Every structure is written in structure tokens, then in C-alpha cells.
Amino acid sequence: QDFLGFHQTDVMHQSVFELIHTEDQQEFKRNLHWALNPPLSLEPPTDPAAEESASSCLVSYNPDQLPPENSSFLERAFVCRFRCLLDNSSGFLPLSIQGRLKFLHGQNRQQSDDDVLVSPPQLALFAVAMPLQPPAILEIRTKNMIFRTKHKLDFTPMACDAKGKIVLGYTEAELRVRGTGYQFIHAADMLHCAENHVRMIKTGESGLTVFRLLTKENRWKWVQANARLVYKNGKPDYIIATQRPLAEEEGGEHLRKRSMHLPFTFTTGEALLYQTGYPLHGFPDSFQGKAKGSKSKKGKADRSSADELNPSSLLGALMSQDESVYVCHPDVEPKISLHS
């Protein structure tokens, strides 16, 4: 969980080959065989059921034909690349896997309501996996602060773990009372997060998303997040987001890469496409050129539409934010008295 970003419930009862790099799957299969020589299928299976059966690599052995359990033939040490939600380069993390094959007992199968097929104990891999390259001190510090939040399908916060409360400073009650979770997201990152939000609703997972969250101290904190849908009775029920704090430099680098694909930047409000500047929160101010005494029906309609603005929308979340969080205040210089 700390190295790959997957929660235990994400990988339980799932095929391990869904997490392994395609080029390393054969090596993993080889190490599952007691003689390092698994049977090879000459032709790839075309039937989905056969393909699923082949990917599981479930091979039954006669225990009398296997070496003793304490034999050195059953010791394993190899390197394999696993899918990593926390890696921002290749998406895979090389793991050094050390362990041994041992007999797994109690794997009986129910044949009918009354009959139970008693299977002989089969070999299973018991191993410890560690990153091949030790993480840097900064990575250890940031990965130790990985936190998780729970949201409704519209991204409204529902819960936050203990580490999230430390990083952001909010209690769960303070998160829930604000409404939509987009109120905590920087205006320059809202559309980026919304795009991945839509992707998650369609595919079940948002993919890596780098953005800024507003802390209780009114400071912006860069995080790298991956959100996934949790289903109940076959239907999406809520969202779990795993978030890793980033250093300011790393977050800024992600923003620069993202801005290269846009015709204008949301960061400063400068519309490069038109070579003009426009304040982010200045929408109402653009009409101040009108006479103060003029009151038209259109003005009343504008105020009415503003009052009816959906607070759960992106614009509603943006307008509900305090403008001061986007203002960089200069450091207060200490006042030195010249009088003793």
C-alpha cells in the first residue's frame, strides 16, 4: 500500500498478473513452478474463459512427486515490475521478491450441496517484496504521509483518515460542511480534476492527478492523487481517493508540463491566446463601467441568476472560495525601534 498505492481490498481475490508488467509475467509464472519450468501453451487461448484459466496458472501437483517442503529447490529470489499508482514516470515499480514455495492446505472445493472435493495441498508462493531501489529520504517522508479521503459520487467529502487531518488540518465535520470537494481545489486545477473525475465515473479509476488542495491555514498543498470507484451491489456507491503530498517544486513541474498542452494558462488568468489579462474573480467587476444609478431588468436578472448559482458546480465552488487565498501577501518585516 505504501509503495504501490493499492489498498488491500483492491488486490484481494484478484489475479496478480493484472498488477505485473506484461514483460515480467512469464518470469513470475516460472517462479511459481517448483522446477522453474511451467508448461507453455503453444497457441494463445481465444476463449475468454480459457484465457482467464491460463492467466491464473493454477497447476495441480501430486505431493509425492514434489521435493520436500524444506528443499532449497523451493526457495525463490527474483525481480518483477509491479503496477504502481504512486509512480509518476513509468507507472511500474521494480520489486525484489524473496521467499519460498510452501504447501497451501485447506483448499477444498464444494462439488455439490453435500459433497466436498478434498484436494491435496498445493504449492503457493510466500514471499516478501521490497523496492529494488531504496527510496530517497524525501520520498520516505512524503510517502509516510499518504492519506485517503472518502467522497460521494459528486466528490462531496464524507470522511478523511488521521494522516489527512494532519496534512490538511480539517476535521471530518469541517470537510463535510463545505459541500462539494471542489471548494478545496485551486481554480487553476479545477478543470483538470473535473476531466479525470469524468474519466473515473466512466472507467472506475481517475488515473494519477496532480493538483493543489487548500489547507485550513489557507495555504495550497500539492498532492498526487488517484481516485477509484467503490461498488455496492454492482452499482457505484462512493469514491476513495489516495493522495500523496508533493514538494512545491515537483508540483510546479507538473503544472508546467500540463500548461504546455493548453492555449492559455489558468494559473495567472493571463489569456495568452488573446494577449490580455483577466482577473480570476473579476466577473462581476467587469460591469462596473456602467452608471451607478442605472438599474435595468437585465441587471436584476443577472443578480437573480447569481443567487441561483448551483454551489455544487465548478463555478459555484470557485465563487464560494475566499479571494484572499489567491493573493500572495508579502512577509511582514519586523519593525525595529530606534528609540531605546
Image (spheres, rainbow, N blue to C red):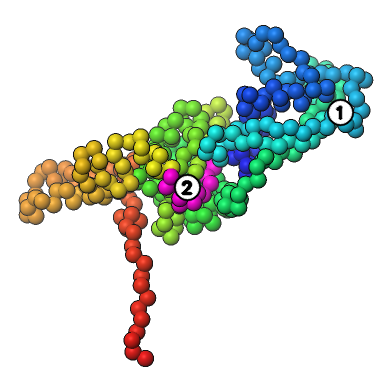
Q: x and y percent of residue 50 in the render? A: 67, 12
Q: Is 31 part of what is drawn in magenta?
A: no
Report helix, strand or loop for mark 1. helix
On the rendered structure, is 204 left or right of 116? left
Q: Amino acid at mark 2?
A: Glu
Q: x and y percent of residue 1 in the render? A: 63, 41
On the rendered structure, is 296 left or right of 6? left
Q: In the picture shown, does residue 58 fall above or below 88? A: above
Instruction: State the residue at coordinates (76%, 26%).
Output: 31
Q: x and y percent of residue 203 in the render? A: 49, 27
Q: Residue at label 1?
A: 73
Q: In the picture shown, does residue 239 fall above or below 57? A: below
Which contiguous range is marked in magenta? 237-253
Q: In the picture shown, does residue 174 fall above or below 225? A: below
Q: Is 241 part of what is drawn in magenta?
A: yes
Give the Cα separation between the discs numbered 2 and 1.
Answer: 46 Å
Q: x and y percent of residue 42 in the render? A: 70, 8
Instruction: State the residue at coordinates (62%, 44%).
Output: 2
On the rendered structure, is 39 left or right of 46? right
Q: Which mark is residue 125?
A: none
Crowding around mark 2 (Cα neighbors within 10 Å: few <14, some 14 to 19, many 20+) is: few
Instruction: State the residue at coordinates (55%, 34%).
Output: 91
- Determine if residue 132 is in view: yes
Q: Nearer the viewer, residue 295 or 227?
A: 227
- Determine if residue 177 is in view: no
Q: Residue at label 2?
A: 250
Q: Nearer the viewer, residue 18 or 75?
A: 75
Q: Nearer the viewer, residue 106 or 217?
A: 217
Q: Amino acid at mark 1?
A: Phe
Question: Circles 2 and 1: CB distance less than 8 Å?
Answer: no
